[in-house]
Image (cartoon, rainbow, N blue to C red):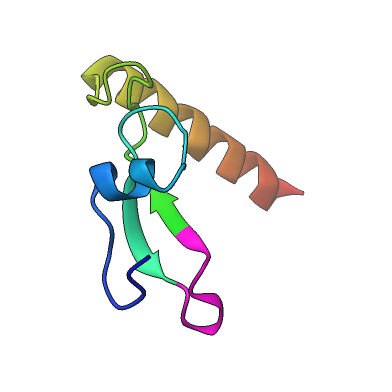
């Protein structure tokens, strides 16, 4: 497994990583390079991997509401 660069989706799937569509390997954790860090945009459809504008809006709205609620505590 390459340790000095980010992996493409085909590469990380070929080493056995299984997750829904739309994820990207975005960072290398220097202290433990066997740990893969993934992210995907809010509102990503897990089946197609595409961002749905309505799902994105709803996810962001829920995120901001939970953030506001946490700040009130």
Q: How many marks?
A: 0
3 magenta-colored: no
Depth check, front residue: 13 or 32: 13
- Judged left or right of residue 68, residue 20 is left
Q: Nearer the viewer, residue 22 or 43?
A: 22
* Residue 48 in which image quadrant: top left
16 on left or right of 4: right
Residue shown at 41% from the left, 51% from the top: 38
Above or below for 12 versus 29: above
Horizontal arrangement in the rendering, residue 65 relative to residue 73 (left or right): left
For residue 49, side relative to residue 71 (left or right): left
**Position above or below: 24 against 33:** above
For the N terminus, the image quarter is bottom left
Q: In the image shown, does 68 or 5 lie closer to the viewer?
A: 5
What residue is shown at x 41% (from left), y 48% (from top)?
A: 15
Image quadrant assignment for residue 49:
top left
Give the farthest residue toward the right.
73
**Range covered by the magenta-colored residues:** 29-36
């Amino acid at each position: 497994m390459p340790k000095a660069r980010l992996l493409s989706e085909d590469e990380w799937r070929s080493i056995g990583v299984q997750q829904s569509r739309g994820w990207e390997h975005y960072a290398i954790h220097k202290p433990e390079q066997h740990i893969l860090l993934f992210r995907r945009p809010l509102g990503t459809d897990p089946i197609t991997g595409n961002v749905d504008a309505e799902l994105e809006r709803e996810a962001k709205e829920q995120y901001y509401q939970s953030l506001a609620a946490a700040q009130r505590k």
